[in-house]
Amino acid sequence: MRSYLAILWQEFVLFKRKFRSITLGAMISPVLYLIAFGWGLGGGMTVGGQNYLQFVIPGIVALTTMMVSFSTVGNAVNLSRIYDKTFEEFMVAPVTMTVYAAGKISAGALRGFYSGVLILLISLLFPAGLKINGFFLLILMLNCLVFAALGFTAGVLIDSHADMAKFTNFVITPMAFLCGTFFPLEKMPWLLKGFIGLLPLTHTSQGLRNSGGDLRMLGLNVVVLALYFVVLFVVGVRTCTKAETIG
Amino acid sequence: MLIIEDLKKTYGKVTAVAGLSLAIRRGEFFGLLGPNGAGKSTTVRMLSTLTPPSSGSVSIAGRRLDRNLTDIKRTIGVVPQHNNLDGEMTAWENLELHGRLFGLGKEERRGRIKELLIFTELEERAHDLVRTFSGGMKRKLMIARALMHRPVVLLLDEPTVGLDPAVRRKMWDLLKTLKAEGLTVLLTTHYIEEAEILCDRVALMHEGVLIELDTPLNLIAKSGTIVLEYFTQGVTMSEFFATREEALSRAASLEGSVNIRPANLEDVFIRLTKRRVSE
């Protein structure tokens, strides 16, 4: 527990030090999305009987928290293992890789959650009538944990920063646009729709939009996200245990 | 204190360390010397728990590396060859993180950080970001960090590489203090002079194999305490002699200028590694 808290302490120190750049950085993309897709493209549009802005804000929250959680952990772990070698400090300390993974993933997920809260605060400027309740926050946190765990696994597994960028291009960016974030999936071809339905971000988008409604659907979203988190966490820890710094 | 038995490390078909065996005594300052690719750093990485050995065994302070990994980590302090401090944190924060990871209590942590910052003469820079430090300051901070949890064995991998001569000498003073305090130290170095000044015993490694192990003085005595150097056919040749008279007698038979001087560890090192290459 002490080691876990030590990792969180380190992340908090770095967060405090870069508070302004982290906060501004987390706000730029969502504000642009809100302006472009909310005011610009979506002004007056309706999707499934609801205001487009009301539809798109949960999608923007889902994709931004995904991006922030993934990149915060993925890039930090990858850089610390390959370039600045700070990963070694944890490897020579009496810290198990499970604790190390838990610390890094928790910290990344909290950063993602923080960016989600920022978007929700910004979205108050837009009259969208969002329903934010316990389910909404649960789905949001699970999304952050899933993608922080994916970032951790990628950061440990991938042996160059260029390949991390490729992973983002091939895995994260397509999810950001396809998983029901900006448009409903009803009109997608059935095969693609089936595949997209398996992806975690789809369950986040659905869950965040549905947080005041269908409990069975919400339960499915929570279970799928929780399963993704457990699997990615286990894979991340196993990969990390085998990983060596490149030295 | 540190026993290595038949330690091997292979990367595919490449053998980095080929069956290294040695024992380091409590309080000993032990040097591991060798040219690039000799296997020194790989050995230290295995002892530091950063790289798992392919085979063989290591025991530190009675604990086996393959059975008591967490205990071993508490026993050793590691100073790697490259800077692995967090540049975005201050010197104090880097030490604090280490103390927290090793489970030191708040008061103990605070006291130890102050003590080590004074020891490494970094107290005035305690709250500056490490990325603003010079190479020598970073190296001193890495030593302070490795000592935070009071290890019984300190592993130093090329601690003075890349430092200018004046800073290197300051580092030597720091290391001599640790030696005087009775800490067991394993040091790898390129700088033969460093090994000669600091080490009680040195092991010479070449291509993953231990080729000689003794005190610096004995190693020199074994090779010959006097060196005769002369230049012939575009190559500087060295010959070793037990006495100056023998060297003078040999010099009389040579044409051109010669140099006769006391042998040092570097001569032994070059002689042994060259011999090894030609074998």
Image (tube, rainbow, N blue to C red):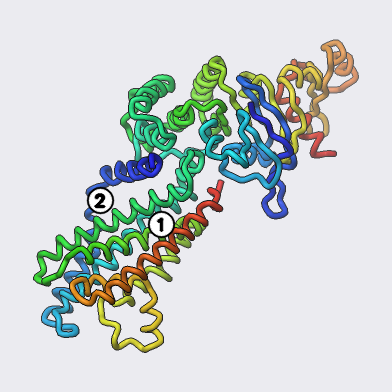
Q: Residue B55 placed where, x, y %?
A: 70, 45
Q: Residue at x 64, y 33 (%)?
A: B59
Of marks 2 and 1, which one's residue comes earlier in the chain?
A: 2
Q: Residue at x 72, y 20 (%)?
A: B215
Q: B45 left or right of A225?
A: right
Query: Which residue is label 2 attached to?
Result: A21
Q: Residue B199 placed where, x, y %?
A: 64, 21
Q: Amino acid at mark 2?
A: Ser
Q: Residue at x 72, y 36 (%)?
A: B5
Vertical order, B18 against B218 (above or below): below
Q: Residue A81 placed where, x, y %?
A: 48, 49
Rendered-image quadrant of the N terminus of chain B? top right
Which of the 4 quarters of the picture holds residue B88? Answer: top left
Q: Residue at x 33, y 51 (%)?
A: A107
* Residue at disc 1, secondary structure: helix
User: Closest to the observer: A50 or A142?
Assistant: A142
Which of the 4 quarters of the picture holds residue B23? Answer: top right
Chain under callout 2 = A
The crowding category of the residue bearing disc 2, from other C-alpha atoms within 10 Å (few below 14, some 14 to 19, many at least 20), is few
Chain under callout 1 = A
Q: B160 left or right of A161?
A: right
User: Closest to the observer: A240 or A207?
Assistant: A207
* Residue at disc 2, secondary structure: helix
Q: Residue furthest right?
A: B253
Q: Nearer the viewer, mark 2 or mark 1?
A: 1
Q: Amino acid at mark 1?
A: Gly
Q: Are marks 2 and 1 on the same chain?
A: yes
Query: Which residue is label 1 attached to?
Result: A74
Which of the 4 quarters of the picture holds residue A113? Answer: bottom left
Viewer can see residue B82: yes
